[in-house]
Image (cartoon, rainbow, N blue to C red):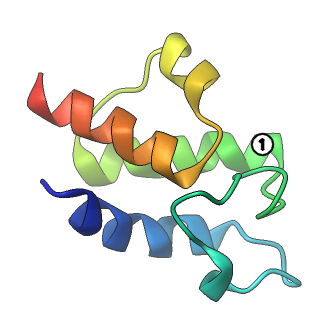
Amino acid sequence: MTSEAIFKQLIPIISTYLPEDVSKDTIQLDSDLTAELNINSAHLVDVVLDVEDAFEIEFANADMEKLRTVNDAISIIQTKLTN
């Protein structure tokens, strides 16, 4: 699956957990999930759970530690899909 296809699937998942003052139009590949998009830690767990369901993968604790930006999520997903 291409990075672009994964990104398109991630936008609605991430958008669900954005605070009201953050537009989904601000989601970019280099967007920091917590610092820029203001997703709190509890919602970040929800994002991961939704991503696991959507892509039928499982995030390990090590993956969670690497998850900072949208691009990090895409890289993790691509790795999981190819293994």
Q: Position of residue 18 (x, y in %)?
A: 73, 71
Q: Residue at x 49, y 40 (%)?
A: 72
Question: Circle 1 is placed at which residue position?
Answer: 42
Q: Is residue 51 left or right of residue 43?
A: left
Q: Along the horizontal axis of the image, is 23 left or right of 28?
A: right
Q: Quadrant of residue 25?
A: bottom right
- Helix, strand or loop at mark 1: helix
Residue 27: x and y, percent?
60, 73
Residue that lies at the very extreme toward the right in this rendered image: 21
Q: Amino acid at mark 1?
A: Ala
Q: Residues within 10 Å of mark 1 (few under 14, many from 20)?
A: few
**Which of 45 and 26 lies nearest the eye of the viewer?**
26
The residue at the point 22 percent across, 67 percent down is 5
Residue 37: x %, y % from top left: 76, 64
Q: Is residue 81 above or below residue 31?
A: above
Query: Residue at left 46%, top 43%?
Result: 73
Left or right of residue 73, residue 39 in this image: right
Report the number of discs: 1
